[in-house]
Amino acid sequence: MKAVACISQVPDTTTKVKIGSNGDTIDPTGVTYIINPYDEFAVEAAVQLKEKNGAETYVISAGKDSVKEVIKKAYAMGIDKGIFIKSDSELDSFSIAKNLADALKEINPDIIFFGKQSIDYDDSQIGTLTAEFLGIPSISVVVELKIDGNKVTAEREIEGGKEIVESSLPLVICCQKGINNPRYPNLKGIMQSKSKPIEEKQASHTENKIEFLKMTLPKEKSKGKIVGTDVSAVPELVRLLREEAKVI
C-alpha cells in the first residue's frame, strides 16, 4: 500500500500580517511559516497506515524553497519520502491541484490524504480538485476512517450531524479535526529528517485561473462604549442602537 499526504505551508496563526509593497501579496518579512494545522492530520493518518499496514508513505508540497521545511516536519513525524514541487511564482488552487495530480500519477498511491482546508486562503477545494484531475472519488471533512482491504468507510461532518460514506481505493480523504491526534516529532525523528533527501520537481502548471488584484487589511474595530451597569441604562442603550449603530 502507498499512502500520500499532500501538505501546505502557511503563516503561523500568531503572525501579524502586513500587505507587501506590491499590494497583492503579504509581506514575508518576519513571518513564521508552519505546516498547515489541518495537514498535520493528513500526515498522521499516513504514518498510522505505515505502522498498521506497512504502507509506504510520501509527502508532497508545492511552492517556494521555504516549503522544504514543512516536508522536513513531515519526515520528523514519520513520513518516508518527500516530493517538493518548486514554483517561484504564486500558484492558485487550480494550478496547485494540477501539479499535485501529475506527481501523484507517478506514485500511483492507494490513498491520498489532505487537510480539509488551509488556514490562509480557506478555500477547501484543493483535495477535491486533485481527486477530479486523477479521476478518483474523494470524501471531505472526515473525522473517522476505517480501511478493510479495498473497502473504505468514512464518517464525515455535515451541517447538523454526521454522515457515513463507503468507497473503495484509490481514494482522496480530506481530514477534519478529530480523525486522529497528530504526534509530536521526537528527537530521533528530528535528527533523521535533517539528512533525508527531498525529491525536487519543477512546477509544470503555472497558468492560474485566479488573479489577485489587491489585498487590504480589515478595518480596525471601533472602541466600545459602556452606557451603564444596571437596568437604568437600557433606554440609552436602545437609543444608541437605533440612532448610532442603526441596527434596530
Image: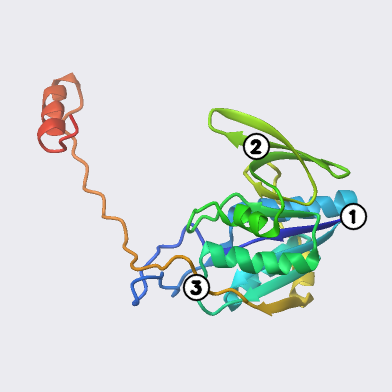
Q: How far apart are the alpha carbons under marks 2 and 1? A: 25 Å
Residue identified by numbered label 3: 90
Which comes before the other along the chain, label 3 or label 1? 1
Q: Is residue 183 visible in the rendered structure shown here? A: no
Q: Is residue 17 above or below residue 196?
A: above
Check disc 1 and report its element: helix, strand or loop: loop
Type of residue at label 3? Glu
Given contact means CB atoms under 8 Å apart, are the residues at marks 3 and 1 in contact? no
Q: How far apart are the alpha carbons under marks 3 and 1? A: 36 Å
Mark drawn on residue 27 = none
Give the left or right position of residue 106, taking residue 163 as reference: right
Check disc 2 and report its element: helix, strand or loop: strand
Residue at 70 percent of width and 59 percent of height: 134
In which quadrant of the rendered image does the C terminus lie? top left
Residue at 73 percent of width and 52 percent of height: 44
Q: At which x and y percent is residue 208?
A: 49, 69
Check disc 3 and report its element: helix, strand or loop: loop
Q: At which x and y percent is residue 193?
A: 76, 70
Residue at 65 percent of width and 59 percent of height: 133
Q: At which x and y percent is residue 61?
A: 65, 67
Q: Quarter-wise, where is residue 243 in the image?
A: top left
Mark drawn on residue 156 = 2
Viewer-nearest of discs 2 and 1 = 2
Q: Is residue 123 above or below residue 98?
A: above
Q: Residues within 10 Å of mark 3 (few under 14, many from 20)?
A: some
Q: Residues within 10 Å of mark 1 (few under 14, many from 20)?
A: few
Viewer-nearest of discs 3 and 1 = 3
In which quadrant of the rendered image does the N terminus lie? bottom right
Give the left or right position of residue 78, taking residue 228 as reference: right
Q: Residues within 10 Å of mark 2 (few under 14, many from 20)?
A: many
Mark drawn on residue 54 = 1
Q: Identify which residue, 35 or 147, lies in the foreground.
A: 147
